[in-house]
Structures are given as C-alpha cells and as structure tokens.
Amino acid sequence: MLKIDPEGLTLKDKVVFINRVAKVVKGGRRFSFTALVVVGDGEGTLGVGKGKANEVPEAIRKAVETAKKSLVTFPMKDGTIPHRIVGRFGGCTVVMNPAVKGSGVIAGGVVRSLFEVSGLQDINAKALGGHNPFNTINAAMDGLMNLMDPDEVLRIRGKKPAPEATESAAPAESPAAVKGA
C-alpha cells in the first residue's frame, strides 16, 4: 500500500523469468535479454522489476534495481492474507485465498516465487486467463495491493475492533450444571 525505502531492509531477490529477444539487423541477429525479478523482505514488503540488457547478469541487476524502487507493503495475518482477493492485469486473473496454518504455498511457478519472497507461508492461489509471466505477476501484485486489514476496515466503518478472546475468561456454565442446582 505504501512506498517503502529499501535502505535498512534485508531484501532477498528471486529471478522469475528470463527471456531472450532477437532483433534481426543487416548482417545477422542481435540478442538481448529481459529479466523479471521479485524482491521482498519476508515480512510483507514486496517489489517487482523488469530489466533489459545485452547480457543476462546485467539484465538481472537492472531488474533488481527497478524492483527496489517499487517496494510496497501489504497486510498479512498469521502468515497468510486476511481475506480472499482477486487481482487482474491485462488478460490475467489471479485468485488468492487465505489458507490454514501448515498448508503451505499452493500456487503456480510465477506466483509462487512472489509469495515466497513476500513472507506468505500459507496461501492458496490460482492464475487464470493468460500465462504471460509479466502480466501474471502484475495481476498478483494488484490483488496484494488491494488487500485491506480487517481492523482498518472496522475503523473506516466507524466500529470498534472486537476484543480478543482471552484464555483467562471464565468458561460459561453448562446447561446440565444449571439444571442440577
């Protein structure tokens, strides 16, 4: 939701996709490379970058720089997302559902790498429509950017968050115990 300064964060990056592009010129072909990279700190901060260069390492370096400039944060709840969300970009749609603790990341390759660097441990996602990696990543980012924290939604609606259930609260008496009294 908010732009983040990459200074002071320990970011890990992951190469999602590398594409070789050939340009036909007089005398042959010129090859260049395009890299798609995601970076994240594992705590809900995430960035996506694309880099183009004549060599693969240079394309990856440019993509990482671009991803660090586009860092954003999104709400997480116990290693998953707070609610179901659908992200759309171009012809791609990514449906993301929260998952119970211990179920792991259930997602396709491109979206899986995004979740792994972001710190999401339990999530279920399905990419629909086109399977262009650039559009799929942007659709997943769209969904994550539109997530809302439940407490924030309650505050916007003018309501107070529900008090957390405490274990020290006395249990309610059973109906059988009340009848015997």
Image (spheres, rainbow, N blue to C red):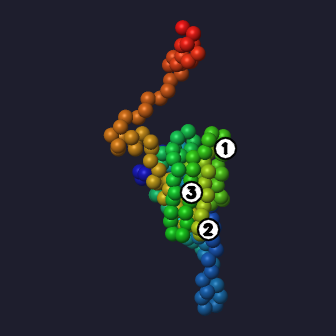
Query: For residue 156, which quarter of the picture?
Result: top left
Do the numbered discs 3 and 1 sit on residues whose CB atoms are within 8 Å?
Answer: no
Count the numbered circles shown.
3
Identify the disc placed on residue 112: none
Looking at the image, is 32 positioned above or below residue 139?
A: below
On the image, the x and y values in percent for residue 112 come to 63, 55
Identify the disc placed on residue 95: 3
Looking at the image, is 64 positioned above or below residue 97?
A: below
Q: How far apart are marks 3 and 2 (CA)?
A: 14 Å
Dot 1: element? loop
Q: Which of the marked residues, 3 or 1, is nearer the chain's N terminus?
A: 3
Q: Which residue is drawn at 46% across and 58% down?
A: 69
Dot 2: element? loop
Q: Distance between the residues labelled 3 and 1?
A: 17 Å
Mark 2 lies on residue? 131
Q: Tell me, yes or no, if residue 72 can be seen here.
A: no
Of the 4 image quadrants, the one containing the C terminus is: top right
On the image, the x and y values in percent for residue 33 come to 61, 72
Mark 1 lies on residue? 103
Q: Which of the marked residues, 3 or 2, is nearer the chain's N terminus?
A: 3
Q: Amino acid under label 2? A: His
Q: Amino acid under label 3? A: Val
Q: Which of the marked residues, 1 or 2, is nearer the chain's N terminus?
A: 1
Looking at the image, is 159 positioned above or below residue 130?
A: above
Q: Residues within 10 Å of mark 2 (few under 14, many from 20)?
A: some
